[in-house]
């Protein structure tokens, strides 16, 4: 089968399954609105103190956080999905069946594509609810399309970290905790500027944040949507994300394939209950 056929079939299947569980869909919408409302009320509760903390972005605390939690969905997807797919295959005991198929790579890619589609839908809902229900102040300048460049490079670079996590899982970390993705998630939440501006953090923490692609992605998206920044201001961020992509993705892919072949030789792809 051709790649496009597999992408179409798997995406259509995933869409039908997703639409079938209407209660789950409804509860996810309620949870999303509640999550947005929490930060809206936090902004109201702390008032000028919260807004002054993000004054360098020329916006309100709520608008600042809305962009952070909305676009962080892509980071979570890219870092966690590879491990999720491999872990599901392992604990379902169909890892070897998947590997024996010529379309394994197509299957993995189509699963990631569906996650990307679903994440994009969630992102749009976050922004729509934030703007029309809670009054977030967002700007869509002529160069808003550069957000897609930032997101693409973010997904590529963080996919490298996700593949590293999957490689560690295949090497033997088959419990509930895989250290690479876990540590990345912890540090990203703490120092990447998802919930508060890194400029307000201690110097050592700001230094640590520079080693995370999340930091540059969130800053770039915020400069566009909150300040209407032009291409010149975004160029350096795109360069940094491109460098992360050039280093992390090939490294993650190489170690993932190496770990996969090692697991095949050692017969550790099967879970013995």
Image: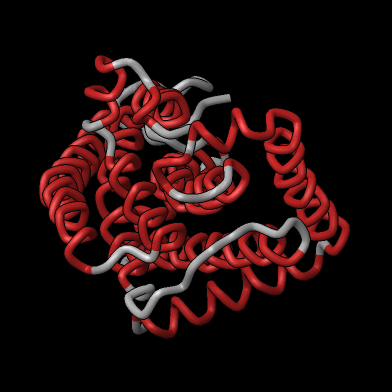
Q: Nearer the viewer, residue 8 or 220?
A: 220
Question: Where is residue 259, by image quadrant?
Answer: top left
On screen, 233 above or below 87? below
On screen, 113 above or below 4? above
Q: Nearer the viewer, residue 43 or 163?
A: 43
Looking at the figure, which quarter contains the C terminus?
Answer: top right
On screen, 264 above or below 1? above
Q: At 21% from the left edge and 42% from the top edge, which residue is drawn?
A: 252
What x and y, as percent, mark residue 219?
34, 47
What x and y, as percent, mark residue 176?
53, 22
Q: At 82% from the left edge and 52% from the top edge, which residue is drawn?
A: 30
Taking 18 as reference, is 230 left or right?
left
What x and y, as percent, mark residue 191?
39, 26
Looking at the figure, which quarter contains the N terminus?
Answer: bottom left
Q: At 29% from the left edge and 29% from the top edge, which residue is drawn?
A: 209
Q: At 32% from the left edge and 76% from the top edge, which residue is drawn?
A: 143
């Amino acid at each position: 089968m051709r790649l496009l056929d597999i992408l179409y079939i798997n995406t259509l299947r995933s869409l039908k399954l997703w639409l079938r569980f209407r209660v789950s869909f409804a509860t996810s919408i309620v949870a999303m609105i509640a999550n947005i409302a929490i930060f809206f009320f936090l902004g109201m509760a702390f008032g000028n103190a919260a807004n002054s903390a993000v004054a360098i972005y020329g916006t309100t605390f709520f608008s600042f956080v809305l962009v952070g939690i909305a676009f962080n969905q892509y980071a979570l997807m890219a870092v966690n999905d590879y491990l999720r797919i491999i872990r599901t295959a392992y604990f379902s005991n169909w890892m070897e069946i998947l590997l024996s198929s010529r379309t394994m790579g197509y299957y993995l890619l189509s699963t990631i594509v569906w996650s990307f589609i679903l994440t994009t839908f969630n992102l749009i809902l976050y922004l729509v609810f934030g703007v029309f229900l809670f009054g977030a102040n967002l700007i869509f300048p002529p160069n808003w399309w550069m957000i897609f460049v930032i997101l693409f490079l973010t997904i590529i670079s963080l996919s490298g970290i996700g593949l590293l996590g999957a490689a560690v899982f295949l090497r033997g970390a088959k419990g509930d905790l895989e250290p690479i993705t876990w540590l990345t998630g912890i540090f990203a939440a703490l120092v990447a500027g998802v919930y508060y501006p890194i400029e307000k953090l201690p110097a050592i923490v700001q230094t640590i944040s520079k080693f995370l692609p999340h930091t540059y992605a969130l800053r770039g998206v915020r400069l566009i949507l909150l300040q209407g920044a032009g291409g010149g201001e975004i160029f350096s961020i795109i360069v940094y994300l491109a460098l992360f992509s050039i280093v992390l993705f090939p490294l993650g892919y190489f170690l993932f394939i190496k770990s996969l072949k090692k697991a095949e030789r050692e017969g550790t792809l099967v879970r013995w209950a």
